[in-house]
Structure formats: C-alpha cells, structure tokens
Amino acid sequence: MVKNGVKRDIPEEIEKKYGNYESAFSRKPVYSRATNQVTAVHPGDSKMLSTVREAIEAAGLKDGMTISFHHHFREGDAVMNMVMEEIAKLGIKNLSIAPSSISNIHEPLIGYIKDGIITNITSSGLRDNLGAAISSGLMENPVIIRSHGGRARAIETGEIHIDIAFLGAPSSDEYGNVNGIKGKAPCGSLGYAKMDAKYADKVIILTDTLVPYPNTPISISQTDVDFVVKVDSIGDPDGIAKGATRITKNPKDLLIAENAARVIEASPYFTEGFSFQTGTGGSTLAVAKYLAETMRQKKITASFALGGITQQMGDMLEEGLVDNIIDVQTFDKGGIQSMINNPNHYEIDAGFYASPGNKGAAVNQLDIVVLSALEMDTDFNVNVLTGSDGVIRGASGGHNDTSAASKMSIICCPLIRGRIPTIVDSVNTVITPGETVDVVVTEIGIAINPKREDLKDRFKSLSIPQFTMKELKEKAYKIVGKPKAIEYGDKTVAVIQYRDGSIIDTVNNII
Amino acid sequence: MVKNGVKRDIPEEIEKKYGNYESAFSRKPVYSRATNQVTAVHPGDSKMLSTVREAIEAAGLKDGMTISFHHHFREGDAVMNMVMEEIAKLGIKNLSIAPSSISNIHEPLIGYIKDGIITNITSSGLRDNLGAAISSGLMENPVIIRSHGGRARAIETGEIHIDIAFLGAPSSDEYGNVNGIKGKAPCGSLGYAKMDAKYADKVIILTDTLVPYPNTPISISQTDVDFVVKVDSIGDPDGIAKGATRITKNPKDLLIAENAARVIEASPYFTEGFSFQTGTGGSTLAVAKYLAETMRQKKITASFALGGITQQMGDMLEEGLVDNIIDVQTFDKGGIQSMINNPNHYEIDAGFYASPGNKGAAVNQLDIVVLSALEMDTDFNVNVLTGSDGVIRGASGGHNDTSAASKMSIICCPLIRGRIPTIVDSVNTVITPGETVDVVVTEIGIAINPKREDLKDRFKSLSIPQFTMKELKEKAYKIVGKPKAIEYGDKTVAVIQYRDGSIIDTVNNII
C-alpha cells in the first residue's frame, strides 16, 4: 500500500500503473494527442447497414476489444442493452466497455459480466443492482471510475482507446451527420458522444430517425462515422429526466439552497458577467432559483451557465439573466427545447467541458459551481460514489472537475440524511479532494475551507452561522451517533481516478 | 523519369517519394490519424500575449519548422505578411510554409525566399509576381501544389505536420474561441483554418476583435488554441471578393453559362433534392443564375449547395431554392451575411469538404459541379495552374476534388482566350485528370467524355452542338493556330499532387 495525497492507502500495483494522487494540479501533461485508425470512404460507398449485428461484424468486433456508448439518454437508453444483446449472441468475449456512464436500466450487464462477455468496465458511475453486484465482488478486474473530464482526458491521451463506438443518434443522415435536437427522441447535447466519435477507430451510428442529407447542425460528423444503422428506438426521452431534475420541496433542502444562494451573492464572484454551474441533485437546482431572484433584483447577468442543463437554465437564458449556455449534457425536455430555440445555448463536447488534458476546458473559466455530496469529511473530501453502506451507487460526473477548476466550489450537504450522518470523520470514498472545495453549506450553517482566508474575511458579515467541519461533524454525530465502520473485504472492486489520471481512492468489496 | 496515369513523365526521386498518379480512386487509405503535441492549460493560465513576436517566441519557433496560415481573407489578408516580417526580424531560417493558399498580396514572400527564411512551400496555388518568380527558378526546392481536399488529407495523415499555425480570427475571446462572423472584419467560414487548429502542435490566434467569453458559434475551439494576440488588423474584407466573384458580362461567357445550365437541366441529376457546386471564375457564377431560373420554373429545389459561397447562393437559400449551404470558404460580403443570418448556411472544415482521406467528404455526396479551366486537352485533362506561357499563376483549389467525387463534373471553357487556344493537344499542367471530367461546355457546343455513354444517350435530344475534344481543339487551332511550345528548363519548380497524394504532374522552370 502507498499513501496518496488524500491519505488513502492505494495498492502498489494500482499505484504503479497510474500513479497516486498528489494534489489537484500537480500534473500538467505535455503529450501526443491520441490517434485512431481511419478507413477512407470513396464516393458511392454506402454506410447504411440493416442490423446492429451487421454493423458489429462490419466493424470487426473481436474478443478483447474496447467498445463505448454515451449516456445522454440516462434511464431511457436503449442502445447499450440492444448492442450487448447482439454481441452476446455472436459469442464475443472478454470485452472492455467504456460508456460515459451507466444507469439502472443497464442491469442486464450483470449477466454479460457473469458470462465473461464483459471483463472490464470504466464509467463515471454505477447504479442500483449493478453497483451492488460489483460491490459484492462480481468482477475479477476492478471498475475504473473516471470523472467526465477525466474520461475525456483519458481518451485524448490514449489511456482509453475505443475500438468501436456505438452511438445512439436522435437524428442522422445516411452519411452519419448526427445531432440530438431533431428526431423522435431528442436528447439535446451529445457532448459525451462527440469525444467517442472523434477518437474511436470505428464509429457506428444507431438512429431511429433518418433525415435527408445534410443533417445540420452537425454534432457528430460524417468524417468520423463508418456505419449507420436504422433501429426502431434508441431510447425514451422521458428517461432522461428521471429522478434527477425536479426542484426539491424538502424544507431542509430549500434552506440549504437559500444559504448557498446567499453565499454566492456575498462572494467576490457575484458581479456582472459572472459564470456558474449548478448541479441537478438535492438542493442544487433550487439554488439557481434563488440566485435568479437576486440577479433580477440587483440587475446582474451571467456571461455563461455551464454543465448539465435543465429547463431552468433555458428560462434564465430566455429571460436575459444568462448570456450563454454551454451544454455538455441536457437534463430535461425544457433544456432540449432551449437548445433547439436558442443559438446561444451551445453544445460542447466533454473535453471542452472539463478535460484537464487539452488546451483549456470551460471549467477553467468557471467562477462558481454548486455541487451536492453523499458524504463529506473533516478534510472537506467529498464522496458522491458510495453509499453509507459502502456500496457503489453514484457517479463521479463532473464533480471533481468543476470543484477543482472553478474559482469557488460550494458543496450543498445536509448534516444528516435519515438516521445517517453526512458529515463524517472520513468519507468512505474520495471523489473530490478537500483542497478543491471552498465552502460547505448545510441547513444549520456553513464551513469555509481554512485555505480560503480571503473567503473567511469576505463572509464575516454574512448572517449565516459558520462552523469548522469538525464542529459540523460533531453536531451530526450528536444527533444520530457515529456511524458504524463498514466491513470491507480484501478485493479491490473499483479504482477511483482523479480527473488527471492519478489514483485518489479505491473501493473494496462489501462482505 | 516514370510515366504516370495521365502520361506525364515524373522525375524518379519525386515518384519515389510520393508515388505516381494511377487513376482517380486507386488509393483508399487505411491509416492512423495524425497526432499533434498538446500542452495542457490549467485554470488561471492566460493565453493572451501582447505581440506577434512574443507569440512566436512562446510557441518556440525554430529553424526548419513548418508554419501555416489560412487564406480566407484572400487578397485582403494581413496576417501572413505581418507574421513573416516578425519572423524575419528574429533571424529564423529554413522554414516550410503551408498556407491553404497564397495571394498576390503575399509578394513579400519573394524576399523571404531569397533570404533563406522560407525554403519550402506547399500551397493550393501561387499568383502573379510570386508565381512568376517561382516559375523562373527562385527556389531550390519545388513548391508542392495540393488541392483543398488534398491539403486536408495531407494534414489528416501527417504528411504535412504543422508545428505552429498562425490563424487570423475575425473574432476571438481571450481563451481562443474563434468565429468568422463577428468582429470588424468578418470573413464567414473558417473552413481551412479549422484543419490547422485541430492538427498543429501550437496554435496562435491573431485577432483584431476580442469579445467576451464564450465567443459562440465556435469555429476554432479553445481546446486547440495555445495563444491569443490582439493586433490592429487581420485583413480587409474587401479583399476577399477581389476579382473573383462578379457575374460576367462577357457575351461569350454568358453563352457558355447558358449552355452549362441547359446541360444540367437535361441531366439525370436535375431532380428534386439534387446538389451542386458552382465555382467563382468566368462563366460559373452565371450558371447558377440561369439554373435558379429553371429551378423556379420547374419547382425543383436543391438539398444543398457546396463550396466557396457567394451572395448568390445565400439568395437562393433565402428564396427556398436551396435547403442547405455547406460552406468551406465564403467569397463575398453577401455570402458572409447569409452565414450570419441562416442556420442552414453551415460552416464545414476542409476535410469535411473534400478530403479523400477521411470517412467521407461532402464532395462524395455532390451531384453536379461546374468548374472553369485555363486549358483543357483532348484527353479531358484540365489545367487551372499555369498560364499559356507555362508560368504558375493559378490554384488547384477544389477543382480535382469536386470533379472526381461528384456524379457529373462540367467544365466551362471557352474555345479560345484572346489569341490563345484553350483546348489543346496536351495541357501544360494537369491538375484534374480527364477521367474525372464528364462534360466540357464551350460557346460553340459541348463535348461529353466517351466514358460517359449514359450521358451521351441522355443528351442526344439536347439542341446544343456536340463535338469530340479533338474537334473542339481543331476548331480552336483553326482560329488562332497551334500554340508554340513553351521552353522549359531542367529544374522542377513545382510538384503537383493529386488529391490522394500521388503525383499527377510537375512544372519546370521557364527559360
């Protein structure tokens, strides 16, 4: 075991392979951008194939290859299961899958893992039954958890090489020009899929809506696409918003949101032309609502809003509170409609959004991000991956990307959830290192990272109680007691990469 | 000497290096896409530099490197001269320059060549005094002439590796997000520049209009840009249209245009949803005018117009005669305004336009292209590079790309120009091989490539006189006599690459 920069013990063979996390910006890569294999297409060559099976065969899928999918349809995605079913029928084994994320709907993966069809996974996260199965030790090789920016970096540097990308497309022409705003199941931005299309050797478009050539705007370009397959359905847009994007009615969450909005308003960054990202979980959507009210009152407008985008952001754009939306992933139908209506609602890819490997991601320009947490600890470390039982059920997402790169990262975190303390001595799993977190907002008050002397000064006059993280933890423990230690086994079931590729933590199996 | 597929003798050392042209589609590359060096940018890092000189030094320009420029400002470009002047002052020598093309305004290059600052050039073409100087043997190494699609392919495959790209930007933010439709000197599409930005190791943006972050739409992305320099002027948009884009009033040219329009209308491709590209020289702009009239009459609309785009195309788009414009280069202010106004006037890069090396260029989807010629011969070969005196004064452009990939290529070519025959036994220089040319249109009639039996049948009822190329040549010779042979020296001053990278011809010095 080798201790890393957030005091986690990392098994030597993993440390050797990736290097340990030191600090948020200790790596500044200079590298040759990853290459991919291109097969030229002549005039008259058709890219259309009749079935997913034909496309798998035409692309030359073989045992041991890496394939990828995007998760823009989230719980509504039909593509990964459809493709895996055909692959299973073809008897192909030992695949690595590298989807941008995995949802509950992908539970059939459990069977493919058991059958040896899938032997490696990298993903932003794992949910429900698949997460539980992995946490119980289902796989021989640990899952590699990467942030959205980290996945982009891994693709750009060649750390992930995708042999074949299977990309669901709300609309495509026969030559593979794709966007997410036309068709019978629009999903808005195709930000994650754009990376795979640029860097995979073979790119297969699966679409349920073929449109005449040329299909503009072009999110994925014909110049990167090998094959196009018409299928009945690529997914259910109703599944995109499932669970994630309703504004909370929970009074505690609303109180946290109001506190967070007041922190933003009192911060040095809340000035004309500021920029922000708010997440979609718990309190974070409500923050934007409160923030919008103050922006109206004080006549302050934002230069841009970033990130996963909802109707709420679209409304702020149309109202003129926000000048631009830069959108890597659209979270609801209102958000999709906003992208259709507004040229200033602009689609970007995951590298542009958050990669620490390119010549400058949008998160580097971000003033304020509001994030949520499953758990935080007295070192300000954040866990958004494993539950209080140690089981994998969340996702890294853009959490550590935005927290590190923004000027002020705010984590909204209730003191307790049910009978479980949320602020603890040490989080089960570190996704976001405490050094990149600036302010923690709870229902009873805030904690400012001691590193940020400037913010401590600034917020002196703020009439929200201020605590240390240790004080918050003690208050939580006082109410519900200290949580019992989780009983882990010896097997590493997940390796947590920090956005820069270093190892920030590992997750062991649950006994 | 080794004879190639258009019966040209190619010096052995050149044949050895690139391979000889065999036929239009004999190469179908499978390759690893070219890579470039990326230096990651952290939050807080600034890309802004004060002067061109600082940028040259920051990018690490050294003797022997390859640098590039785009030619979207054509005769109005201020960037190449500005940068070369600074480079000369720094005493850097032995550079290769790889601009997308070179205009008259770049005559100062002659001095830099004489001084050993520039020792290699690749370009689409050369004009006036620079062309004459090169043709007289100014350079030790031959210039490599590449088509627009061929340059894109050469960049994609790594045949051209750009160390530093100096890219003029009508508008940019401080992080390097660039477009050509905002700012004080808009140029419309940045199709050629987009290639360089993606593949160069270092990308320097020179802009005269800095705008707030994020500058959308994004033609060149912050993720590809290293440095941004604010300069007084990047060019004069009035220079874009100079000479190239007025509709002819010459009665002979108008007659040719009318004949070409009638050929199109009688062709099997003139059906609902057809696609076309018309050039900007001589008759070709007028063709679109006549074509538009017939489209109105017959209520036929085009799915897309491709290529260098003028106001005329914008007008056809707004009238509903054309559904989409896909634009690699905008040729006049009306064209630029059309791109600003219409989301269906869509910007593409040079690879998307015409590269034979990617997974399918737009030219592959093109039904009809109308092109011009300086000279044609009885084998249908086309010369658009050298004058009747053998001196380089033209450009390859998208000529052989579109002629090869479209379903029907029409060359508008007067029988004679002044006292010089335009249709000859053998062209001075082959840019476009005759096998890819379908119909030649002159003021007295047309010639159909014997390969195209189908078109011969189809055009039987067309009331335009039909000739063989030999007959047309004889008619030309009868009027003005057979042209005197040009006296060439022994030095190869230009190597003509076909779009696929093979050598289709060479040009020797003029004695």
Image (cartoon, coloured by chain):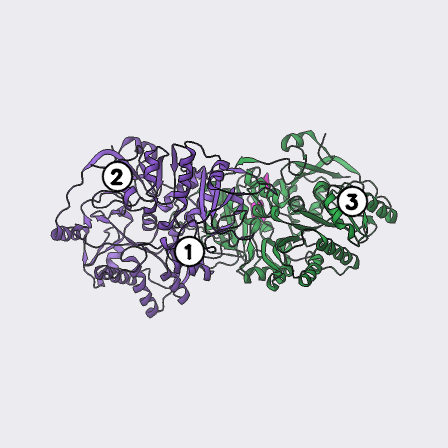
Chain colours: A green, B purple
**Discs 3, 1 touching: Cβ within 8 Å:** no
Marks 3/1: CA–CA distance: 55 Å
Marks 3/2: CA–CA distance: 78 Å
Q: What residue type is labelled 2?
A: Ser
Task: Please report, as a chain letter, where disc 1 is located.
Answer: B
Q: Which of marks 1 and 2 is in front?
A: 2
Q: What residue type is labelled 1?
A: Ile
> How packed is label 3: few (under 14 Cα within 10 Å), some, or many (20 or more)?
some
Marks 1/2: CA–CA distance: 35 Å
> How packed is label 2: few (under 14 Cα within 10 Å), some, or many (20 or more)?
many
Q: Which numbered dot is residue B135? A: 2
Q: Is A103 inside the magenta-drawn segment? A: no
Q: Is A92 inside the magenta-drawn segment? A: yes
> For mark 3, what is the residue?
A389
Q: Is residue A363 left or right of residue B38?
A: right
Towards the viewer: B258 or A109: B258
Q: Which numbered dot is residue B326? A: 1
Range shown magenta: A85-96
Q: Is mark 1 on a helix, strand or loop?
A: strand
Viewport quadrant of the N terminus of chain B: top left
Indicate the position of residue A172 as horizontal and vertical percent values: 49, 56
Towards the viewer: A350 or A303: A303
> How packed is label 1: few (under 14 Cα within 10 Å), some, or many (20 or more)?
many
